[in-house]
Amino acid sequence: EAGVAQSPRYKIIEKRQSVAFWCNPISGHATLYWYQQILGQGPKLLIQFQNNGVVDDSQLPKDRFSAERLKGVDSTLKIQPAKLEDSAVYLCASSLGMRGQIRPETFGSGTRLTVV
Amino acid sequence: SQQGEEDPQALSIQEGENATMNCSYKTSINNLQWYRQNSGRGLVHLILIRSNEREKHSGRLRVTLDTSKKSSSLLITASRAADTASYFCATEIQGAQKLVFGQGTRLTINP
């Protein structure tokens, strides 16, 4: 099966600019996750979608980050305006898991964001 | 916040030796998963162990889980250069529907 697709692969922007990341999960996967991974740390969940509804966005900095999953398939994550501390790899993952049934997650290769 | 704590943070061994990584967590879990991440890549799922299981094998991987101590270990036997990567434990917390990742162990296999 095709994996989780993410784009772009790399992005360099200046602080206060905006940026958007795109994710196409594995076909049929109901759950989609966005993680932020700062260098040297483990991934931190930003937002979790079940189909096109938000399940958990408790760690999403909502003053600058937004995400949507239209039609329950593709998703975009946006940062506006970016800060230096947003420099990280943004990982998208998907799983078959329905509510209460977490399955192993399949990750995309990520987008490496550098804010200068 | 990160729930899992991996130990050691970094491990360097010779090819052919066994590598053991440990993970401790704080709250009750449904399951614990181990993932591998090669430099600059996404995470790859290795193995999942449920809270009612104590040990699980997959190829050269052996995972143990001790829920009374809230800890898990990942053993890689007969290590190879290709095993060089970062390894993360992730816990599915009871009552939540998400994984919480630890900080990871950076494993280096020297030829």
Image (cartoon, coloured by chain):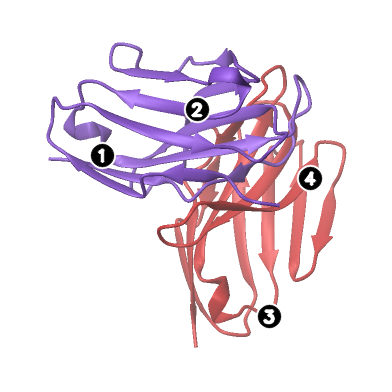
Q: Colour of chain B?
A: red
Give the chain letter at badge 1.
A
Q: CA distance from mark 4 to mark 3?
A: 22 Å
Query: Which amino acid type is shown beneath numbered disc 4?
Result: Ile
Q: CA distance from mark 2 to mark 3?
A: 41 Å
Same subunit: marks 2 and 3? no
- Residue A105 higher or lower than B84, as above or below: above
Is residue B58 toward the left or the right of residue A14 in the image? right
Write down which chain is painted purple. Answer: A
Find numbered disc 1 in the image and state the secondary structure of the residue it sits on.
loop
- Residue B17 higher or lower than A55, as above or below: below
What residue sits right under mark 4 in the picture? B49
Where does the image place residue A56, in percent across and percent down from the top left?
Answer: 56, 16
Are the two marked residues, 4 and 1, in contact with CB atoms closer than 8 angstroms?
Answer: no
Give the chain letter at badge 2.
A
| Residue A116 falls in image quadrant | top left
